[in-house]
Each structure stands twice: as C-alpha cells, then as structure tokens.
Amino acid sequence: MGDGTAEYAHTVCELPNALVPEVIFVALCGPHLRFVVGVVSKRCQVRSPAVIIGPMRTQLAVFCGALSALALVAIVVPNSAPAAGGPLCQVTDQVNQWSTGFTSNLTVTNNGPALTTWTVTWTFGGNQQVTSAWNAQVTQAGSGVTATNASFNGVLPTGGSVSFGFQATYSGANGTPADFAVNGQPCNGTGTPTTTPPTTTPVGSGCTAGSAIFCDGFDDQAGATPSGRWSVATPNCSGTGTASIDGTVAHTGSKSLKIVGTDGFCNHVFAADPTDPPAAAPTWFVRFWIRHTTALPTGHVTFLAMNNSAAGNTDLRLGGQNGALMWNRQSDDATLPDQSPAGVAQSVPLPVNTWTCVEFSVSGATGQIQTWVDGTAVPGLTEDGVPTQNVDDQWLAGSGASWRPNLTDLKLGWESYGGGGPDNLWFDDVALGTSRIGC
Ligand SMILES: [Ca+2]
C-alpha cells in the first residue's frame, strides 16, 4: 500500500478508545495483495465503513465484516493490560440455595487473550464456606476463594467459556460476590441468581460434605480408569465387568462412575476405596446417587460391598433379589429383609433410568442398619436390634444377634451370582460420613 491511504471498502469498525486490542491481524487484501493490519475485539461495534490502514503503520483499526478476499494471519497479543473501559472476563453465577447451603455454577467467558490456565478469585460477603467443587480446584482462605482449572479445562480461547461449580454452607445473607477476577484481571457483568432459591434442600443436590469424610463426584478424575481414592478391584477372580469414569452421564458435574456388569461371580468388578472407611468407625454413613438400566432381577445381585474385617474379611453387600433392594451378609448369607413375599414387600425396587439417592448407616457398635431411598426410610432394610418377622428376624438369629461389623473398604460395582443378570450402572456424588449426609 504505497501511499498508505485507504483504498478498499470493507466493513470496518474503529477501535473504541477504551478497548485494548486482543488479536492483531495481518492480512493480505485481494485482488492486489496489499498488507492490512487490524485489531479485533469482541466488544467492538461497527461504526464506519472503509477504514484501511497502510502497511507497517501503527494506527489500529478493527475489522468486523466479512473478509472473504483476505488471507488472515492471527497474532495473539500476549498479556494485554486490563481494559480501562471493558472487562476482559465475565462471570455469571447461577445459585441454588436452601436454608443452610447452596450450590453455585459459575460460567466464565474470556474476552481477553487466550489462556492455557485460569484462576478465578472472589470474596464472599458473609460466612459462606465451600465444602466441595467440580470442574475446578477450589480453595478458601477466610472469605477469599480461589478456583483453578482442572487438568482438562485449562485452555480457554478468546471468546470461550468454561463452567465450574461448588457447594457451600452459609447462614444469614448469601449475596453474590462482586469482585470476580480471572488471572488477577477484574471481571464485571456478574450475573444474579437465575433460579428462585428454594426453601428446602433441593432434590438433585450434589456433594454435601459438611459432615462427610469425603464426597466424591468423580469430576476431578482425569482418565477413564478410576484413580485417586478409587481403584478397580476384582477380588479373587476377574472376567468381563468394567469400571470406568464416564463423561456422558452425571448426577452433578460432568462425570460419574460407570459399571458394566454381567452375570457370573467372576465377572464382578468394583471401584474400591480401601482407605477412607476406617475413619468413619464405629458407625458408617454412606450416601450415593445411583442410576441403572435394568430392573433388579429375581436372582441375587450386589452393587455395593464393604469388607468386614470382624467376620473373616467377608463382605457386607447391598444389592437386590426378587426385584427389590436387599442387604446380604456374605459370612452366613443372611438377608435383610427375609426373602419371603411379605419381607420383599417391605423393601422397594431400584428405579431404572433415573438418579436415585441411597443412604444407609451401619453401626459397628450395635450391628444396626438403617437405609433410606430418596430420603425415605425403608422398613425392610432396617435392622433395629429387635427381631421383626419377615424383616430382620433371620438377620438377628443365632450369632447374628452379636454381629458387629468393622468395615474397612467401600466398593461400588456389580456382582451377580449366576442367574442374577447384567446391568449398566452409574454412581455419582458418593459421600462417607459419621452422621447422616442427606440427598
Ligand atoms: Ca459427577
């Protein structure tokens, strides 16, 4: 562009003074193949046509129109200073709160240079305390909170968005933080809660770790093989069952534990946590969400097992038989409830193709068991120390009266004892505690 004057009529917008360039384009303009230098900003507005900059000139303009005749080469400007007149990031905050806690799903949009890692910070205005998080590592010091990307979502291009979330407790007011920042650059445009806060704990909440030893939503799992506290276990023999992290089905967040279970004992498979359960002794409270595809069969199946070191390292099993949920004690094959029709009728099926919240407690001090499905106690899955016909009379008979388990692991998976059948199962938001955790 020899004389450096405008010669082509493209749709161009001037760079508003307040904006900082994000991407510089060096373009070859056809048909005369002349250089054009431009700057693109997400926030520019078309103001005037036909501003063309000569080669190598330092004046900047923003191309917003169709540049079909141009061959573009993008040069990302590193670490632009924060714009004086516009945010480099926007954070929206979708809050679901109840009387003592809330979940917050944050969506961060990057209006600045492309990022390969990100850190979002904010300050709570009250006594909010983060208890768990998904799709980010979240730490809190006083009222200040820092969320850093997970291993799989650090890349955030210009114009891109990423979402993560957390659960927290609070009392009093629960205002939306006003000082969201990304990598130290302040954001604005912070949204307000888009859902009406319910007055009771919502069905469908994720990890409630207030009193939990752990609450695991599997969202920080980087690979397909369960890792961290979980490892794939096939005690004694192995076959066709598989345990993997699934990114297509989740109760909350984006991932869950998937079990492909088939019939036959040696096809069993579990994701096992062998380290945390002793911390809950003597009374274990477990809460998990489960989803599966095949109704509980007539035959005996297990989807959760815990090693009992007080009974020769045999398993205490939760699963089903005769179409309903059932506890089974491997050491003597006792069942809870009795598998009489009247006993089975006091248990409940496990719904298919929907997430179901299952909670239970097992006491090593008294041997008693309580079980809740979607928050409702199930009489047939209750051992209260007093023999009840069709329910826990068999369980408490003989040496069963002095049964005092010591549970040393937690295994989620599938074990079918020949004739039980196959099933596909997902587990999510698994919590272990010393008191009831809730759904
Ligand atoms: Ca999850």
Image (spheres, rainbow, N blue to C red):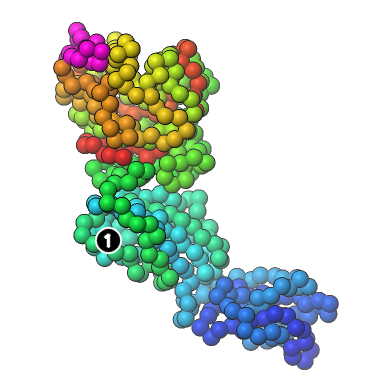
Please identify the quarter of the rendering in which residue 29 is found. bottom right
Residue 81 image point, x, y percent: 48, 77
Residue 334 showing in the rendered view = yes
Q: Nearer the viewer, residue 438 or 22?
A: 438
Q: Residue at x 34, y 54 (%)?
A: 96
- Taking 439 as reference, is 8 above or below it? below
Element type at mark 1: loop
Q: How many marks?
A: 1
- Residue 375 belongs to the span the image colors magenta: no
Residue that extends furthest to the right in the rendered view of this protein: 31
Residue that extends furthest to the top in the rendered view of this protein: 398
Image quarter (top left, top right, bottom left or bottom right) of the C terminus: top left
Label 1 lies in ligand 1 vicinity (Cβ under 8 Å): no
Image quarter (top left, top right, bottom left or bottom right) of the N terminus: bottom right
Q: Residue at x 25, y 33 (%)?
A: 285
Name the kind of residue labelled 1 in the image: Asn
Residue 22 showing in the rendered view = no
Residue 160 image point, x, y percent: 54, 62
Residue 180 image point, x, y percent: 38, 67
Q: Is residue 252 left or right of residue 316?
A: right
Crowd around label 1: few <14 · some 14–19 · many ≥20 (10 Å):
some
Q: Nearer the viewer, residue 167 or 405?
A: 167
Residue 151 image point, x, y percent: 48, 50
Q: Which residues are magenta?
A: 387-402
Give the residue number, with chain letter if any, for mark 1. 174
Q: Nearer the viewer, residue 388 or 331?
A: 388
Q: Residue at x 43, y 21 (%)?
A: 296
Please identify the quarter of the rendering in which residue 273 is found. top left
Q: Residue at x 48, y 14 (%)?
A: 264
- Taking 287 as reference, is 297 above or below it? above
- Taking 63 as reference, is 109 above or below it? above
